[in-house]
Structures are given as structure tokens and as C-alpha cells.
Image (cartoon, rainbow, N blue to C red):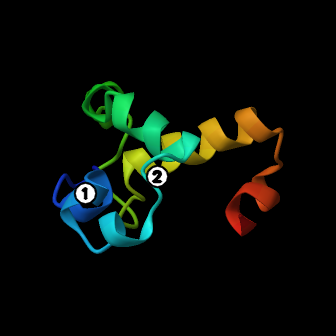
Amino acid sequence: MKSKHSNNSFKNPESTYLSKTLNPRHELYMLAQIIDWQEFEESFGSLYSENGRPPKPTRLMVGLIMLQHMYNLSDERVVLH
């Protein structure tokens, strides 16, 4: 099933309650601000199927893979963090 672009709170934490709880000086927060997430949406959008379960947001999936590589985490460990 194709990714939906309707979850703006996940894409833009500044527009939600997260802006009050996250540290804008944290390295991951700053990294998230400079990544062109829309480019990932466009690049991976064609890989989603119209069938099956609703997909996880592209930003979540790319973010988890980035964390895995940055911190040398297994699939299980990155989900736990």
C-alpha cells in the first residue's frame, strides 16, 4: 500500500507538542532538520504497493535505518530505542 503524506505531525515536530519536549540542540534533532525528507518520500514512494497493510511512514523507516548505521544497532535494538 502506498505511503500516505497526511501525517504532518510526524514530518514536522516543530508544529506539535514535541517542540516543547525535544531538545533542539540534540544532534539527532538537528540532523532531522537538515535532511530532505521529501526526497526520500519521492524516491521510495514507487516501491510501495497499493495492496496489503498500510505502510509505515517513509520518514520513520529511513530514520530507523539511519539510526541503525549511526549506532551499529540490530533491527531489534533500533526498535527498542
Measure the C-alpha gap from mark 1 to mark 2. 16 Å
Q: Please, which residue is most extreme toward the front here?
A: 25
Above-or-below relation of 38 to 4: above
Image location of residue 64, percent across then percent down: 60, 48
Residue designated by label 1:
14
Q: Nearer the viewer, residue 73 or 33?
A: 33
Res. 72 image quadrant? top right
Res. 28 image quadrant? top right
Q: Name the residue located 46 percent from the left edge and 52 percent from the top edge.
A: 60
Residue designated by label 2:
60
User: Of the residues shown, which amino acid type is indicated by label 2?
Assistant: Leu
Q: Nearer the viewer, residue 57 or 20?
A: 20
Above-or-below relation of 60 to 28: below
Q: Name the residue located 19 percent from the left edge and 62 percent from the top edge.
A: 15
Above-or-below relation of 29 to 31: below
Image location of residue 20, percent across then percent down: 33, 70
Res. 71 image quadrant? top right
Image location of residue 29, percent across then percent down: 47, 46
Secondary element at image label 2: helix
